[in-house]
Image (spheres, rainbow, N blue to C red):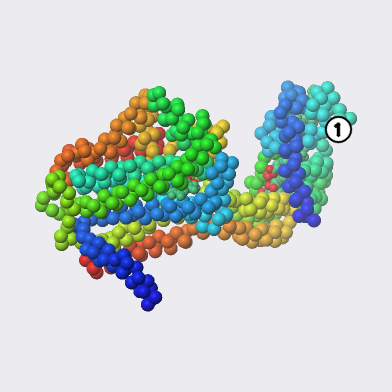
Amino acid sequence: MRRWGIILMLLAACVMPSTQAMGAAPQVIVCIQCHAAQPARLSDPVTLWQTSIHAEHGITCNACHGGDPMDAANSMDPARGYRGVPAPTSVPALCGGCHMGVTKHYMNSAHGRALGRGGPTCVTCHGSHDITRASLELISKKNCTTCHTFDKALMIRRAMVKTDGMLKAIEKRITILKSQGIDTDPLEKKLFSLRNRFHAMYHSLDVTLIREESAHIQAELEKTSGAGGAGTGYLVGVIAVGWALLAALLFSMIKKNID
Amino acid sequence: MEFLRNIYNWIDVRLGTHEIITEKRTGYLLPRNVNAWYSLGSVLLVIFCLQIITGMLLMLYYVPDIDKAFDSVSFIMTEIPLGRLVRLFHAVGSSMMLLVLLLHMFSILFMGSYKSPRELHWLTGFFLLLLAMGISLTGYLLPWNQLSFWATTVATDCASSIPFIGENLVELLRGGKQVGLHTLGRFYTLHVGLLPALIAVLIGVHLFLIQRTGVSTPPFGLEDTSNQWKGESFVYEEHPGGIPFFPNFFLQDMISISLYLACFMVFVFFFPNIFIPSTSYVPANPLVTPSHIKPEWYFLANYQTLKLFPSEIIGLTVQAIAMAFLALLPFIDRGEEKHPLKRPLFTFCAVSGILLWIGMTVWGLYS
Ligand code: HEM
């Protein structure tokens, strides 16, 4: 089941930006045109959003707030699908429309269960408009000690650090292999799904699950470490050069004998 | 064994092969003071054979079409077993061939071996250098990547500054106004057909000349190091009491070849990116000009010279004069002395010339 959720999320992530971008990117939508000229409370979201990962992928205001981005006069008409500012309790459902795997983990976690009763929503940790690429840096004293102590948070972080490092190392290796003209497509595909599975998992807050899954993912990653042809030429190279040098030595010994 | 011996005998009684081997090989004597530099020619033969073999293997999968060339080279690199190795052998080998050609030439320069009666040896060698540069230039376009496309565009563009015929010459080279499908066709034909054939023929002539005159005496470890040739009549330069070619000098050849192969494979296996930079993994795009286009190292000096002069035609003329001087060197330097230290003016000029060339190359690399 979880696998299907991830696949659906991936599909959404792949399809959404392109369809959205095609509809919206060529012209600035009316929401942004008008809001940029409004007082701070209404215009700040625009400036914050502009450098976000959502803006980069063409996820515009109306993706979260609804409304008609093309018709200035009626853009914020509920009849055109305008939903207004989402209430904190409905935020996970809103984000979950696209980030299904993450949201499913979240809803089953202590945070999800405490939704509406002092638990954090997606925007407590990620922000609502200035959302950037997420990383383990988000698990910090600053973010995680407003409601409870840091020890549990730290446990999760520790459980994830090693796999996170492995993923980063493999990403780096892929860029190097690419620059050597090696076909990295299969490796990248595999890494992509493992990576998504891993980063979504955090939201479960379940240390045992994270440990189990991390071990599983690490095993998968280790299988890829030989792939891509890196290092295969190295040993052969040492042997080949060694043989040539040995031959040179042999010939010069014979020559000494004859001269 | 018996069977093989019978075959050998069958051939021997008809062609006298045994005589060739004993008389021409064991009886073929080299000067007593012959040195390792004399084995570079054999190294060059091996390199050329390796280029032919690896080139033919590449031809099995390479497709000379602008839509398929890049992919076919990627296919060779990633899908064909040992394809990556074969391509690296060929690409790295071409650079190494130029390098060894230059070493061969420099050694002959300093030992005065180009002096009479060996002017023709030098001339054929000089044309072999030109052809090797030509075959490398034409081969460089074939993978059809950004680097090769733009380097070829710039290189062929040079010809346009030649007065009167320039424009037509560029179109002849490119087969059109721009580097494109017809350029690839032309370069491919030159690279795998005409140029290898010409090189093979010229190597044959080069070797024939060496067989006729005999090997020169190096000017080291002797009292009299002047040229002994008087020019009255044809004489084969004999070396009585010298070193037999087989097996003694043959072993020297094998040592040099093995050492060369070791160096060569160090580059192939450990530093291939010196010769195939990562930009060459981007397919050619005529619409996107890369920020800096640099030719291969052996053309860097030419490239820098062109940039140095205010107009291209002056730069080209200067280079043409320098090349002509190099080609005609044996006819210009008629001195008898062969030892480099006993003709200081020549040695000073030669060293300065080589340093100038290296300087221009380095400057071209970092400019
Ligand atoms: C005589 C010495 C030769 C030299 C110096 C030479 C040089 C080169 C160079 C510089 C390239 C481009 C290298 C690259 O980026 O891959 C190339 C490619 C190629 N050469 Fe040669 N070549 C020689 C002989 C031959 C011969 C005899 C053949 C075939 C009969 C051949 C067939 C090819 C083919 C098919 C390619 C394109 C594949 C590729 O780019 O990897 N070459 N050669």
Q: Quadrant of the N terminus of chain B?
A: bottom left
Q: Is B214 on the left or on the right of A154, as rendered?
A: left
Vertical side of A172 occupied by B304: above or below: above
A67 and B193: which one is in front?
A: B193
The structure residue drawn at horizontal position 30% and vertical position 36%, both measured from the top left corner, is B323
Residue at x 86%, y 33% (from the top left corner): A81
Query: What residue is shown at x 70% (from left), y 57% (from top)?
Result: A210
Residue B162 drawn above or below residue A86: above
The outermost residue toward the front is B14
Furthest toward the left, the residue is B223
- Total number of numbered labels? 1
Quadrant including the C terminus of chain B:
top left
| Mark 1 Cα-neighbour bin, 10 Å: few <14, some 14–19, many ≥20 | some
Q: Which residue is pictured at 69% across the width and 29% down the height? A: A47
x, y percent for residue A181 = 54, 48
Residue A172: image x %, image y %?
56, 49
Q: Which residue is identified by label 1?
A: A81
Position of A79 with respect to A88 (left or right) is right
The chain identifier of the residue carrying mark 1 reads A
- Percent x, y for residue A126? 71, 41
Q: Is residue B292 visible in this depiction of the protein?
A: no
Relative side of B344 to A227, left or right: left
Label 1 SS: loop
- Looking at the rendered structure, the kind of residue marked 1 is Gly
Residue sitting nearer the eye, B161 or B302: B161
Q: In terms of depth relative to the viewer, which is nearer, B340 or B195?
A: B195
- Outermost residue, right direction? A79
**Does the rendering let one see residue A55?**
yes
Left/right of residue B124 with respect to residue B287 in the rendered view: left
Residue A96 in the image, given as x and y percentages of width and height: 79, 44
